[in-house]
Image (cartoon, rainbow, N blue to C red):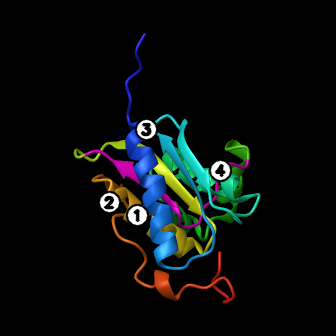
Amino acid sequence: MRLKVTLPLEAALGIVNSAIGTARAETMLPLTIVVLDAAGKIIASQSEDGSGLMRFDIARGKAWGALGMGMSSRLIRDRLATRPSFQAALAAVADGAFVPVPGGVLVLADDGTVIGAVGVSGDTSEKDEYCAITAILAAGLDCEPNSPDANWRGSSLSGPSAH
């Protein structure tokens, strides 16, 4: 038996390495990156030295939530900001594997078909998302969203808008 691959291991590993390279170039906090295929299976994952214990679950929850809802975790946050009951219901349905903040990015094939998702956690959600988008594009793939928050660089874990 041979299974159809939606997101090849080589591409997933490239995304992980590129995200870490981007984070180091921007002197971000240590990251954890999780790459899922279209079925939600983990293809690649890596945590930098010093990345917190819960970061894997957060990164996976960002990616898995994006796949489950068919939109980036930033868009989920924006659309559900005034619907806390629905957010709670989604978290319950997902057994807690649902993190509705930026950093979960859909990976798209050339025709716009979703072939996977990337979740990043470790710095601010906006910086996490920046690393995911940059890495996916560097791998020659498309993504949703296809550009980071314009103010990603100004986000801070010590400010009131930290995630």
Q: Which residue is mark 1?
A: 133
Of residue 84 and residue 72, the one placed in the foreground of this image is 72
The picture places residue 51, in percent across and down from the top left corner, at: 69, 64
Between disc 1 and disc 4, the foreground one is 1
Neighbour tally class for label 1: few under 14, some 14-19, many 20 plus, Cα within 10 Å: many
Three-letter code for the amino acid on which mark 4 is drawn: Leu
- What's the CA distance linking mark 3 and mark 4? 29 Å
- Mark 3 crowdedness (10 Å alpha carbons): few <14, some 14-19, many ≥20: some
Helix, strand or loop status at disc 3: helix
Disc 1 from disc 3: Cα separation: 18 Å
User: Does dot 1 land on a helix, a strand or a loop?
Assistant: helix
Q: CA distance from mark 2 to mark 1?
A: 6 Å
Q: Is residue 12 left or right of residue 127?
A: left
Residue that badge 3 annotates: 9
Q: Which residues are magenta?
A: 96-109
Viewport quadrant of the C terminus: bottom right
Residue designated by label 4: 90
* Amino acid at the residue labelled 3: Leu
Dividing the picture into quadrants, the one containing residue 133 is bottom left
Residue pictured at 57% horizontal, 76% vertical: 28
